[in-house]
Amino acid sequence: MIKKIFNEPLFHFLIIGTVLYFLYSYNNMDSQVNIVENKKTKSIYINENTIQKQINFLESYFDHNITKSFRNIIKEKLYEEKVLLEDAYSLELYKNNKEIEKILLKKIKYILHNEYPIKTISEEDIYLYYKNHIKDYSKRKNISFLHIHINPRDVKKLTPFLYSLLEHTSALKNFPKENNISLSQLKKEYGNYFVMQVKKIKKGVWTKAIPTIDGYEIIYITQYITTKAYSFESVQERVYEDYKREEKQKSYEKILHKLKEQYPYYKE
């Protein structure tokens, strides 16, 4: 009877599948532990010329001087990118090449944002998030926002690095503001597609470049006047995506904090 079982093709298939599963789990476990639990430290050095090049570009593009606080944001973001690159190198994902560095940064950020588990999201979680952010899911009448105008020829220059600079709250004072403008006025000035996007954008988040009548705008909503809230059922999918994005960002920031301890900033 036992000999007959050993000769069964299904038995062989199950054995092979089990071995492959454990090999896969072992390899993935090693790579994940290496990202967040390696106890060795390596100081990170950021060349001042690198910082100055970024400042020169921003000052020429936005046509005003960069403040000291914004300079510190640039330094912090360059440091974060070096931290992520060092971890990518530790995973042996690299060749020391500028183009590959860009790919590695994109890859490691994707891994940290998407491959680390977040808590299971229940419908109760989503509904509570909806109730706590009800204005984000209400019809909008008037809007106040910061904005950066981008010429079509320049939109490809807006790298993820430049977008990430805008995430710092101290960057907010650097850009022009539209105050209490109606959706109908927005439509005249920026176009219908822009208004469609503005209706869905959460307050307190910089957007990607949105096409308008005469180029692109990156915007950050500071305030809005709303009327009636949309029903939970009609916006449930949007609420879920917003909630999941925030949970992923929290997870990413925790991992990044651990990585910064692993790769401290080198001070001259």
Image (cartoon, rainbow, N blue to C red):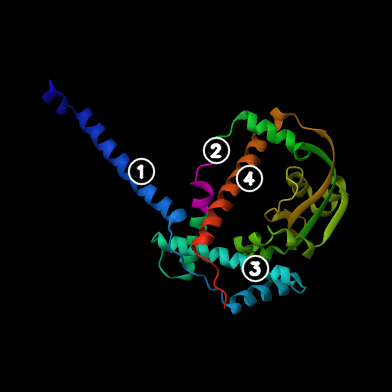
Q: Residues within 10 Å of mark 1 (few under 14, many from 20)?
A: few
Q: Is 134 displayed left or right of 115 in the figure?
A: right
Please state which of the two labelled residues, at mark 3 or mark 2, is closer to the viewer. Answer: 2
Amino acid type, residue under disc 1 in the picture: Ser
**Residue 119: mark:** 2
Instruction: From the image, tell me which residue sits under label 4.
Output: 246
Distance from disc 4 to disc 2, alpha carbons, whole Å, reads 12 Å
Upstream in the sequence, badge 4 or badge 3? Answer: 3
* Residue 52 shown in magenta: no
Distance from disc 3 to disc 2, alpha carbons, whole Å, reads 32 Å
Q: Residues within 10 Å of mark 2 (few under 14, many from 20)?
A: few
Instruction: From the image, tell me which residue sits under label 3.
Output: 74
Q: Quadrant of residue 172?
A: bottom right
Amino acid type, residue under disc 3 in the picture: Ile
Bounds of the magenta span? 110-119
Q: Residue extending furthest front?
A: 39
Amino acid type, residue under disc 4 in the picture: Glu
Instruction: From the image, tell me which residue sits under label 1.
Output: 25
Residue visible at 67% across and 37% down? 239
Find out whether the residues at labels 1 and 4 contact each other: C-beta distance under 8 Å: no
